[in-house]
Amino acid sequence: MKRKGILIALAVACTLSMAGCQGGPNALAKRIEEATPGANARSSAAGEEKADTSDKENAEKDIADRDIADKDAANDNEDKNAGDSLISKDFGTYELPEGWEENAAHSGGDKFFYVEEGHGDDAQPDNISINVGSSNYAEDDYMTFKDAILSQLLMQVQGSDVQVNGEGTYTDSGDVLLIYTITETGCTTKQYYIVGDYEYCLVHLTVYSGDDTEGIKAAETMVNSFQWAD
């Protein structure tokens, strides 16, 4: 909700700015017209007809542009989701990218693990887990929740060479998303906290291979497609 409010505020600012730019030339044209003898009488009918035609053309162009934009967006979504599987759990739904599968041997209770196809028997496969937990923080109190998670992580790595970085953004559904990257020798993890009201969904990526490209892409697909259960 906060992100939408920011976007609305920016849109209003841009609209006001454009209106101000348009106001200058229009006002000048009006003053020239009024200073020209007989200009109003000569141009009134022609101006109205031109305005009607221009408005109609602009409206038709806007409709055509919207149709093209809608088709492009639909095609993008089809390409993006092609091959992905919709997973439904008690706590919500999310898309599992093509090329990944559930690791039933390690999944259990309310926590589910996923690995790239063909790597389930590896000693240390790159993997993604997802689970939901409860918290002491309301959805709007995500800043306090952020600080609590960061404080806990820093306590866990105290005295080691582990590096912790945090950032905040939103999912494609508009939920607050807190991301923590923990880097240590031989392993990198990224924790994606989707913030709910006194609850959270944690998507946890662990990378042993040294190449986190596919893992991040898969984890972010799961995060951005996540929908809380009703």
Image (spheres, helix red, strand yellow):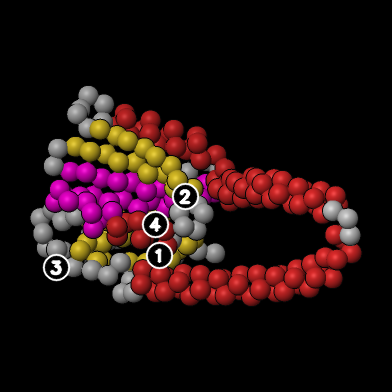
Numbered circle sitting on residue 94: 1
Disc with the residue nearer the chain's start (1 vs 3): 1
Residue 47 in the image: x percent, y percent? 79, 67
What crowding class fits label 2: few (fewer than 14 Cα within 10 Å), some (14-19), or many (20 or more)? some
At 81% from the left and 48% from the top, the residue drawn is: 31
Query: What residue do we see at 70% from left, 70% from top?
Result: 54
Q: Secondary structure at mark 1?
A: strand
Q: Mark 1 and mark 3: span between their CA atoms?
A: 22 Å
Q: Given contact means CB atoms under 8 Å apart, are the residues at marks 1 and 4 in contact? A: yes
Front position among marks 2 and 3? 2
Q: Position of residue 13 (x, y in %)?
A: 64, 45
Q: How many marks?
A: 4
Q: CA distance from mark 1 to mark 4?
A: 7 Å
Q: Which mark is residue 170?
A: 2
What are the residue bounds of the magenta stretch? 187-216
Identified by mark 4, the residue type is Val
**Amino acid tagged 3:** Gly
Q: Secondary structure at mark 3?
A: loop
Sequence-wise first label, 2 or 3: 3
Sequence-earlier tag: 1 or 4: 1
Is 41 rendered above or below residue 17?
Answer: below
Report the magenta stretch's main SS: strand
Observer-side mark, 2 or 1, equals 2
| Left or right side of 199 for 158 | left
